[in-house]
């Protein structure tokens, strides 16, 4: 059986003895660390399945982070930064036997990020104290202290998990109050910034604002003014080629550390960056981060671009536009575009980073597209949408609308759809393609509101056909338009137009209106041989995409399509499909991220119950009397239950965490199937045969709970006994699959746990 622990919250008012000890001896760092190690070690011992004697040095990373959260949960409300930091630092301390973690450098960032996120820490002073403590963990112990790489990883964890304001405080707090107070030389300050950039890696662009603030605080606190320029530029140059966003953040932090700068000072600094060959690939990022306060962006562009090559001019234009507003676009591009022979070739560069302001982006697109032919316009559109797709895919709708409205080339639905078809295959961001399709469809709907669904379907189908990998995004964003009033009708029409995209239509439309997920899926599946053969795959894909509670509705609606032979009108799924369907839905529920373990168990019980009722009805409900059909039905029910149980984890997990459900859920699955059988009104002789002690159903379900005699297997047997003997509140503690009207399903949707777990 699983062990349940209290949720991780730093504001808990439970004060453990070890924490009292921490508060009493907080002035003594070494003693505080020792107490923290003892506390975390004690929490490790409570984790299910963990090996006896596991310590902070020997625990797996996941178990260590789990125990850290449990330890932090024991802190009193209003705990001081020093108290919090002492526990977090202890996760990487040498253990009681003096053993160190072999992966200390790799997980330092995870330790900080986990403490911040799982314990809802928002206080800058606490985060700064935690970061500094981890940064300096095992100080003085040359073999156990973090290496330079480990320190960079630690800082990257804090930067990714915090806001710019907090990152500034972290940078200021690392060393204390004076130059190189963190213990390094000026050159080591620069190297730490570069190493932290590398630790941020691909997340540097998303963390750009926080990293810039950190750089500002760190450079101000750790370096004398005379050293900052040299070290900031060296750090930026070291990463400019591989991580352009990080180079911009470092130099942006440096400029901010200088205080208010005049236009002349900003231009002079930026001219130095343009002349630095090592910064060439990061010019857009660097100029964007360092010239925001320059008040004349056209003059800035002219001052930076004089005598520069075409490639540099495009990056300079990008950076200046990123540093400016929509009002600056015309002046900057009027200064730049006369020297451009093919605007489609510079569109991606100019647009990159400008997707966070749709008004500015629209102004850029409009200016680029003016007086261009259809081919060049398509190239500009592909470039712009590719340029913004990684960070701001949602702005693709604004970009395509601006492109279409920039002239008179795309005045019909067909011409607008053709534009989307030309652009879509060239864009790697599937989400951006989806938003672009929605933008085109919205214009087409506005032109023909009486046929809104048809217009949206035509756009989606045309673009999906040329960008199949983006098909689900296209279906989703198009269906989500307010002009598409009937999401189910849209999905059916789209799947009918091209059965190849039946799954994409079902998932996309269901995401657009999750309350219809079951009905949409059930409407798509009967459309043709392709969707029928892929029914379990389609149902599982929808269940995986929408909220976890909606998996129940998918099971109920798709299960209702099942018939004995698959030939009944409107019910095309053969009974043989039910096992595959159950397994697919079960796996989809288990794989859904961020769902509590207990709630996964709830969904699995509901799915098993509803599909069981579908099977019973497929064979004629309580009116069936043919012995062959009865035997086939009973065999199918057993196979169904076993299929759902097969997706359960054989290893016990903790229900308070977002982990897959384990064998303890088998009792809910078995009990819910049994209650559904009991409630279906089958003749007593048929019901008794299914419930027979030692019968096939009992043997299969008990086996599904694990080895004979284990707690979970015994609980399965106990659940079956409660239903077949009608003892206690048997009719209330499990899910009843016969209650599958829309009202009943809504009630199930509102119930986040199984009746059994609710007590």
Image (cartoon, rainbow, N blue to C red):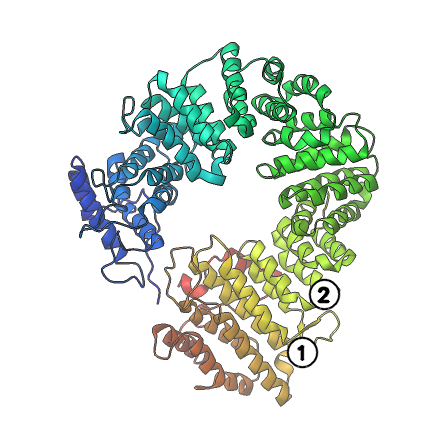
Q: Is 644 or 617 nearer to us in this picture? A: 644
Which residue lies under the disc numbered 1? 564
Q: Is residue 420 above or below residue 298?
A: below
Q: Is residue 283 left or right of residue 525?
A: left
Q: Residues within 10 Å of mark 2 (few under 14, many from 20)?
A: some
Q: The C terminus appears in which quarter of the rendering?
A: bottom left
The residue pinned by badge 2 equals: 530
Rendered view: 407 above or below 741: above
* Residue 729 left/right relative to 86: right
Residue 576, position as x, y percentages in the image: 63, 76
Numbered disc total: 2
Q: Residue at x 46, y 24 (%)?
A: 251
Residue drawn at 41 percent across, 19 percent down: 229
In which quarter of the view is residue 571 placed?
Answer: bottom right
Across and down, in percent, residue 419 comes to: 77, 39
Quadrant location of residue 532?
bottom right
Could you tell me which secondary element the residue under label 2 belongs to?
Answer: helix
Instruction: Tell me if residue 116 can be seen.
Output: yes
Regarding residue 292, the answer to whether it shows in the image is no
Residue located 68% across and 51% down the image: 471
* Quadrant in which residue 330 is drawn: top right
Question: Mark 2 near mark 1, Cβ–Cβ under 8 Å?
Answer: no
Q: Indicate the position of residue 581 as horizontal and vertical percent values.
A: 59, 69
In the picture, the disc for residue 536 is none
Earlier in the chain: of badge 2 and badge 1, it is: 2
């Amino acid at each position: 059986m699983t062990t349940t622990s209290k949720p991780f919250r730093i504001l808990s008012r439970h004060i453990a003895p070890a924490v009292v000890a921490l508060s009493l001896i907080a002035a003594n760092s070494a003693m505080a660390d020792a107490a923290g190690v003892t506390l975390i070690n004690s929490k490790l011992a409570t984790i299910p399945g963990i090996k006896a004697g596991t310590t902070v040095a020997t625990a797996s990373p996941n178990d260590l982070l789990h125990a850290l959260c449990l330890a932090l949960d024991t802190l009193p409300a209003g705990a001081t930064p020093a108290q919090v930091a002492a526990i977090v630092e202890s996760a990487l301390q040498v253990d009681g036997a003096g053993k160190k973690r072999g992966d200390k450098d790799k997980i330092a960032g995870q330790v900080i990020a986990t403490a911040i996120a799982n314990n809802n820490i928002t206080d800058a002073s606490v985060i700064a104290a935690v970061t500094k403590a981890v940064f300096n963990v095992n100080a003085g112990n040359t073999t156990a202290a973090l290496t330079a790489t480990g320190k960079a990883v630690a800082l990257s964890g804090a930067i990714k998990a915090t806001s710019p304001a907090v990152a500034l405080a972290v940078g200021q707090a690392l060393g204390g109050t004076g130059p190189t107070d963190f213990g390094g030389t000026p050159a080591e300050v620069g190297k730490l910034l570069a190493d932290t950039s590398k630790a941020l890696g691909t997340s540097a662009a998303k963390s750009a604002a926080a990293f810039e603030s950190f750089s500002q605080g760190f450079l101000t606190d750790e370096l004398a003014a005379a050293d900052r320029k040299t070290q900031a530029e060296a750090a930026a140059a070291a990463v400019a080629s591989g991580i352009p966003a990080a180079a911009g953040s470092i130099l942006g932090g440096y400029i901010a550390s200088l205080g208010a700068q005049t236009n002349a000072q900003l231009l002079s600094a930026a001219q130095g960056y343009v002349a630095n060959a090592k910064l060439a690939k990061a010019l857009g990022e660097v100029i964007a981060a360092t010239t925001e306060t320059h008040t004349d962006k056209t003059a800035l562009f002219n001052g930076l671009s004089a005598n520069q090559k075409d490639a540099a001019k495009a990056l300079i234009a990008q950076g200046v536009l990123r540093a400016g507003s929509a009002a600056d676009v015309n002046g900057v591009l009027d200064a730049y575009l006369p020297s451009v022979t093919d605007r489609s070739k510079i569109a991606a560069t100019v647009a990159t980073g400008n997707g966070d302001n749709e008004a500015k982006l629209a102004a850029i697109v409009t200016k680029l597209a003016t007086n261009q032919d259809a081919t060049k316009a398509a190239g500009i559109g592909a470039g712009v949408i590719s340029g913004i797709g990684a960070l701001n895919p949602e702005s693709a709708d604004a970009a395509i609308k601006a492109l279409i409205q920039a002239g008179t080339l795309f005045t019909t639905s067909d011409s607008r759809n053709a534009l989307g078809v030309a652009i879509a295959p060239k864009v790697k961001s599937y989400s951006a393609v989806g938003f672009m399709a929605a933008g085109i469809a919205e214009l087409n709907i506005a032109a023909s509101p009486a046929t809104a669904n048809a217009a949206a379907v035509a756009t989606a189908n045309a673009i999906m056909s040329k960008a199949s990998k983006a098909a689900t995004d296209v279906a989703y964003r198009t269906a989500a338009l307010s002009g598409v009033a009937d999401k189910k009708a849209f999905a059916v029409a789209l799947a009918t137009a091209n059965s190849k995209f039946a799954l994409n239509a079902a998932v996309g439309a269901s995401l657009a209106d999750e309350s219809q997920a079951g009905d949409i899926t059930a409407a798509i599946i009967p459309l043709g041989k392709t969707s029928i053969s892929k029914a379990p795959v389609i149902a599982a894909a929808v269940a995986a995409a929408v909220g976890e509670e909606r998996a129940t509705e998918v099971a109920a609606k798709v299960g209702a399509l099942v018939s004995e032979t698959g030939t009944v009108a409107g019910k095309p799924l053969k009974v043989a499909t039910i096992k595959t369907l159950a397994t697919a839905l079960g796996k989809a529920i288990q794989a859904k991220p961020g769902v509590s373990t207990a709630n996964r168990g709830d969904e699995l019980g509901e799915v098993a119950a509803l599909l069981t009722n579908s099977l019973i009805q497929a064979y004629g409900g309580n009116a069936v009397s043919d012995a062959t059909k009865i035997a086939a039905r009973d065999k199918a029910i057993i196979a169904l239950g076993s299929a759902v149980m097969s997706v359960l984890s054989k290893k016990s997990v903790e229900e308070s965490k977002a982990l897959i459900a384990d064998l303890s859920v088998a009792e809910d699955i078995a009990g819910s199937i049994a209650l559904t059988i009991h409630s279906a009104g089958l003749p007593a002789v048929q019901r008794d045969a299914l419930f027979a002690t030692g019968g096939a159903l009992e043997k299969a379900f008990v086996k599904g709970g694990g080895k004979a005699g284990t707690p979970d297997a015994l609980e399965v047997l106990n659940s079956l006994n409660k239903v077949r003997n009608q003892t206690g509140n048997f009719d209330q503690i499990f899910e009843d699959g016969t209650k599958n009207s829309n009202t009943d399903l809504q009630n199930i949707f509102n119930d986040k746990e199984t009746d059994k777990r609710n007590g």
